[in-house]
Image (spheres, grey):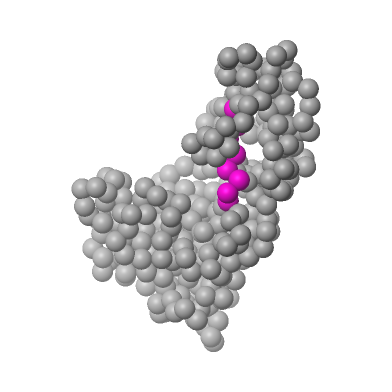
Amino acid sequence: MRPFHREDRDQLTVLVNLHAAAVVPGAGVSVNTVLSSLERCPEEYVTDPWVAERVTLVAEERRRIVAAAHLLRYRNDPDVGDDYRDTGHIEWFVHVPSEGDGAAALLMSAALAQLDRWHVRARYADGHLPVPGVYGVPDAWPHVRSVFETAGFVHAGGIETLLLAPVGALPAPGSAPLPGLSAHRSVGPLGTRITARAGDAELAYIELDTQLDRPERHARPSGTADVSDLVLPDEPVPGLAAWLLGEARGWLELCGVERLLTYADPDDADDVEEVALLTGLGFTELGRTARGWTHEAA
């Protein structure tokens, strides 16, 4: 067990990508992305400035990195949100299954010891890798879940379903399902918004984040975008969702995007309906991820 050294960067990236690719097909990030994420997380523009300390630990066996963990301590200051103030987080924890199990247990002990030295009021854990769509503890990581549970972490949060659609599998752009219906593109709070309008009335919109795959951050172009938001009318309009996704497909193809990610809460009735709708329109359920892990001894 030891702190991360810069010369570990290639092996650590391999370990991170091994876990990411089991969640999102073909997912992978560059060495530069992994190194940068150990220093700061600019996408988390609210919570990242609250971080006081960052520590990355690795377990090495015969010169091979078989387990790694990234830890954060949040400041105990008035400007820090109540849920984060004076807390310690295992931001992510990864290890080689089976052959790295013993090292993983030792590394978790080292991580908990670090949280103890920080004297934080609460201890949390996650699997938030610097890869789009990889967070919580995905069901593709039973080995990580086992380490968390053995160490005394309990799942206290929600479950999210991760869905993916090849852009070519989305409905093709076609005729509007209502007379006078048109699509309007604009800048939204989270990405590019495509709004379905009937006259001056906005019936629905989809917002697309096409900035997930900045070239300086990724090992190879993957052309992945994210559905930042999807709003449909309370009263269903036959064909509207398919038409809106067709408009989104046309825009994504112009952007060179090949895949579209989205997320849903399987315990929320509205999201359950949305998942059923999307799986009929080209999306495939990749799996589920458990968010919100708390250490019961904290």
Residue 116 appears in the picture as rendered: yes
Residue at the outermost bottom position: 62
The quarter of the picture where residue 280 lies is top right
x and y, in percent, of residue 10 in the image: 56, 76
- Quick one: quadrant of the C terminus? bottom left
* Residue 103 as seen in the image, left or right of residue 166: left
Residue 263 appears in the picture as rendered: no
Q: Is residue 213 above or below residue 285?
A: below
x and y, in percent, of residue 213 in the image: 60, 54
The quarter of the picture where residue 118 lies is bottom left
- Residue at 52% across, 75% down: 9
- Residue at 51% across, 53% down: 135
x and y, in percent, of residue 291 in the image: 47, 48
- Residue at 43% across, 44% down: 157
x and y, in percent, of residue 105 in the image: 45, 71
- Give the mark count: 0
- Quick one: quadrant of the N terminus? bottom left
Residue at the outermost left position: 78
Looking at the image, which is closer to me, 276 or 183? 183
Taking the magenta stretch, the answer to whether it contains residue 206 is yes
Specify the segment rendered in magenta.
Answer: 205-212
Q: Is residue 247 above or below residue 104?
A: above
Taking the magenta stretch, the answer to whether it contains residue 198 is no
- Residue at 58% across, 51% down: 212
**Secondary structure mostly taken by the magenta-highlighted segment of the chain:** strand
Q: Is residue 25 above or below residue 54?
A: above
